[in-house]
Image (tube, rainbow, N blue to C red):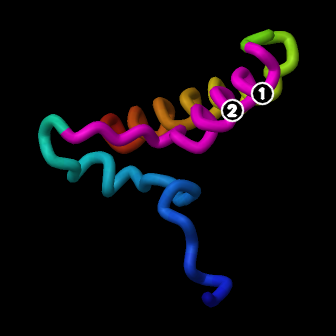
Amino acid sequence: MSDKSQDKSTERITLREFESKLPGKYLNPCELESRNSLKCLEKNNFDKKYCREYFEAYNECKKLWINERKKARFG
C-alpha cells in the first residue's frame, strides 16, 4: 500500500464536492472532528470535560467551513 493511498474516512470534503452533491445526500465536511469527539466521549464515559479539545476542533472546523461557503457564494 502506498503512502498516497488514504482512508476515505480521513479525507476532507472539498467545497466543490459539497456544492455538487446529489440532493438528499448527506456530507459532513467536519466528519473527522465529529467522529473524534464521539470516540472521546465513549472512551471517557460521556464525561465532556475530557473532550474539550475535540469539541473545540469540531467547532473550529465548522466555523472555517461556513466562512469558506460564504466566500464562495458572495465572493
Element carrying mark 2: helix
Name the side, left or right, on which 43 lies relative to 62.
right
Q: Looking at the picture, tell me which residue is in the foreground, 22 or 50.
A: 50
Calculate the distance from the C-alpha at mark 1 to the C-alpha at mark 2. Answer: 6 Å
The location of residue 37, given as percent across then percent down, is: 68, 28
Taking the magenta stretch, the answer to whether it contains residue 72 is: no
Outermost residue to the bottom: 2
Magenta residue span: 25-45
Identify the amino acid type marked 2: Lys
Callout 1 touching callout 2 (CB < 8 Å): yes
Does 32 appear in magenta? Answer: yes
Q: Quadrant of residue 7?
A: bottom right
Identify the residue at horizontal 53%, vertical 38% (top origin): 30
Count of all numbered marks drawn on residues in the image: 2
Residue positioned 35% across, 41% down in the render:
27
Q: Residue furthest right?
A: 50
Give left or right: position of 49 versus 69: right
Secondary structure predominantly adopted by residues drawn in magenta: helix
Residue 46, by quadrant, is: top right
Please tell me which residue is depicted at 13% across the width and 39% down the height of the picture.
23
Give the vertical position of 59 relative to 32 (above or below): above
* 40 lies left or right of 71: right
SS of the residue under disc 1: helix
Classify residue 61 as left or right of residue 57: left
Q: Position of residue 25 (x, y in %)?
A: 22, 41
Q: Amino acid at mark 1?
A: Lys
Q: Residue at x 67, y 84 (%)?
A: 3
Dot 1, how many residues are within 10 Å of its Cα: few (below 14), some (14-19), or many (20+)? few
Query: Circle 2 is placed at which residue position?
Result: 39
Q: Indicate the quadrant containing the C terminus: top left, top right, bottom left or bottom right.
A: top left
In this rendering, the answer to whether 17 lies above or below 63 is: below
**Residue that label 1 marks:** 43
